[in-house]
Amino acid sequence: MLLDMQFICIPLFYYKGSWLILVTTIISSFMAFTATNIDDIFILLVLFSQVKTGVIKKEGRTVREKTKMKELYIVIGQYLGFSVITFLSIIGSLSSFFIPVSWIGLLGFVPIYMGVKGILSLRSYKRNEVIDNVSGSIFKVALITLANGADNISIYIPMFASQNLKTNIVTLVIFFTMIAIWCFISYTLLRAPILAKVLERNCHIIVPIVLIGLGVFILFRSDTIQLFY
């Protein structure tokens, strides 16, 4: 979500009190993270749904078994992908180096590939085989996080550039704390009886569709689609 930075970054140099600088940095960092990562809650919700149950078919009946993927894989993957985003943002704020958002948006093909693969795996589901877990590795989760957060870089670069070292450290602490909170919220929402029941029964169908939709959304949101014209 692209927002005008004048509504997110509070000009800290207008204030003399260090405590006020700290408070305004915390507020602006919280606002920036929330505005640019609100959609991640739903994506994390879908990913965590794969951890709770792995659905397979045995002798004509549905059997739910715990998958190999651990909750920790998703959390680490989320942190890894977001770390790349913040690293590129900091580098961009310190120099003229900047990877165009449209090029980073090419990563949108990653969730599309995973989604198509998941749909094709439905045949294996019918043949009593376990469906390939879309988020079965830290690397896959990190790629999804990086692809979905490509446009965040254009928000974070001016934010880091307008702050000093100390306030940037505070911002990073807030960002990485918010990731943990985001993961906790998503995992907690999954415990809602109705939502959990729907995801457990249909996650093998929902996940591929969500990933394909996410990939297409990333391609258009990042203007990556214009690279092919």
Image (cartoon, helix red, strand yellow):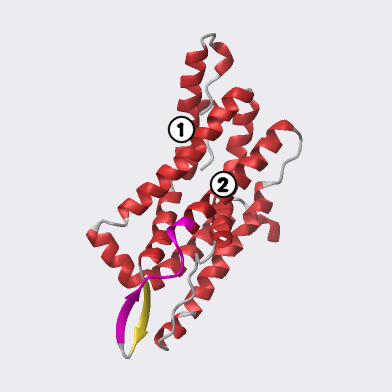
CA neighbours of label 1 inside 10 A, class few (<14), some (14 to 19), many (20+): some
Residue toward you, 3 or 66: 66
Q: Where is residue 217 in the image (x, y as percent from the top left)?
A: 52, 57
Which element is circle 2 on?
A: helix
Q: Distance between the residues labelled 2 and 1?
A: 16 Å
Residue for badge 2: 82
What's the amino acid at mark 2? Phe
Residue 5 in which image quadrant: top right
Q: Where is residue 2 in the image (x, y as percent from the top left)?
A: 54, 40
* Residue 229 can be seen, yes or no: no
Magenta stretch encompasses residue 68: yes
Residue 12 in which image quadrant: top right
Q: Position of residue 228 (x, y in %)?
A: 69, 61
Residue for badge 1: 31
Residue toward you, 40 or 226: 40
What's the amino acid at mark 1? Met
The image shows residue 92, relative to residue 117, as above or below, that is above
Magenta stretch encompasses residue 95: no
Residue placed at 44% from the left, 56% from the top?
43
